[in-house]
Amino acid sequence: MASMSATPQHGHGDGHAPTRARRAWRAVCHLATPHSHDAADRVDSAMEASKAGMRALWISLGALGATAVFQAFVVVASGSVALLSDTLHNVADALTAVPVGIAFLLAKRPPTRRFTYGYGRAEDVAGVVVVLVILGSAVLAGYESIRRLGEPSDVRFLGAVAVAGLVGAIGNEIAAQVRIRTGRRIGSAALVADGLHARTDALTSLAVLLSAGGAALGWRWADPAVGLAITAAIATVTWGAAKQVLARLMDAVDPDMVAQATEALRTVDGVVDVDRVRMRWVGHALRAEVDLSVPPGVTVETAHRTAHAAEHELTHAVPRLTAATVHAHPAR
């Protein structure tokens, strides 16, 4: 018996003319089930995710922008290279909202003949830009710290430097909370990476207090040493963010989600075995390709109904899975 495949998509027809009984049963199912997979609902979900992402970016941009402006004035007055490192990083963190925001706007655009899956992957490209911006700030901060170690100088207005460090910690933690929570809720790896970066910045901003304390004791090397420590922290979070973003670019997903999908498929009537499950992220949404075994000798219509039921079960069982292509073939 030849291999049978079905690509069920709600709102676009089954590919077979349904009988009146099947149409009536389907209507009853949709009335009784408080879920929907219509194309319009999927677009609405994507729009809501993009709106939430933009809102998070605006809030964090405001917090980090105000923080960086205040710190910049203190840097000019005090000459603290540790605070300079922190300020540069906060400026870079604020600027990363630009590529991520552009990605969210692009994600709203509908698919085209060229970009048939839409523009959701723009977020992954934005994640690469975020990592590069963070890396650039680390290089500049490290250079200034090493230069100051060779040419030590006194730090002025130590109280203002300490206050600026506290302000930096508060501003970064606000940005981190907003970005991480929103990113995890809408499934944005770029936004989560940006938030983790801001959270590390909150800790490194507190290191500026050590610089002020060392300078108060007359340790001229303390300020550039803390600047180097902040640079090391920035490099660490850059590596972590890079791994997360590159994993998304390589279509990595949580293995637990694949296991969850497999278990859900095995509960579908007519499924003999689950041969393969492949999943990938497209922006905020997951897409899946599934190979199923059905009993030998079943009709194409029966195999299609099984595939349709499998797609329905899968989109309910796996969070943020919006579409699945299910191939059904006879078991050997």
Image (cartoon, rainbow, N blue to C red):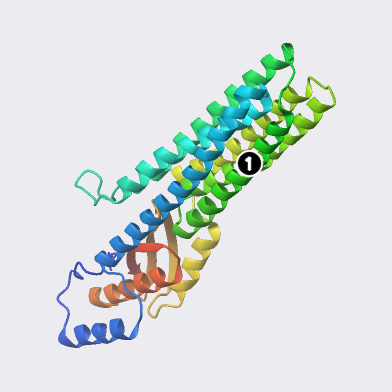
* Residue appearing at x 22%, y 69% in the figure: 11
Disc tally is 1
Q: Name the residue beneath numbered marker 1.
A: 167
Observer-nearest of 156 and 119: 156
* Residue 121 visible: no
Classify 139 as above or below 67: above
Please identify the quadrant where the N terminus is shown.
bottom left
Classify 242 as above or below 318: above
Q: Is residue 129 left or right of residue 195?
A: left
* Residue appearing at x 62%, y 46% in the figure: 170
Observer-nearest of 164 and 126: 164
* Residue appearing at x 35%, y 73% in the figure: 312
* Residue 152 visible: yes
Quadrant of res 221: top right
Q: Position of residue 33 (x, y in %)?
A: 35, 82
Q: Is residue 222 left or right of residue 119?
A: right
Q: Position of residue 293 (x, y in %)?
A: 39, 69
Q: Amino acid at mark 1?
A: Val
Quadrant of res 268: bottom left
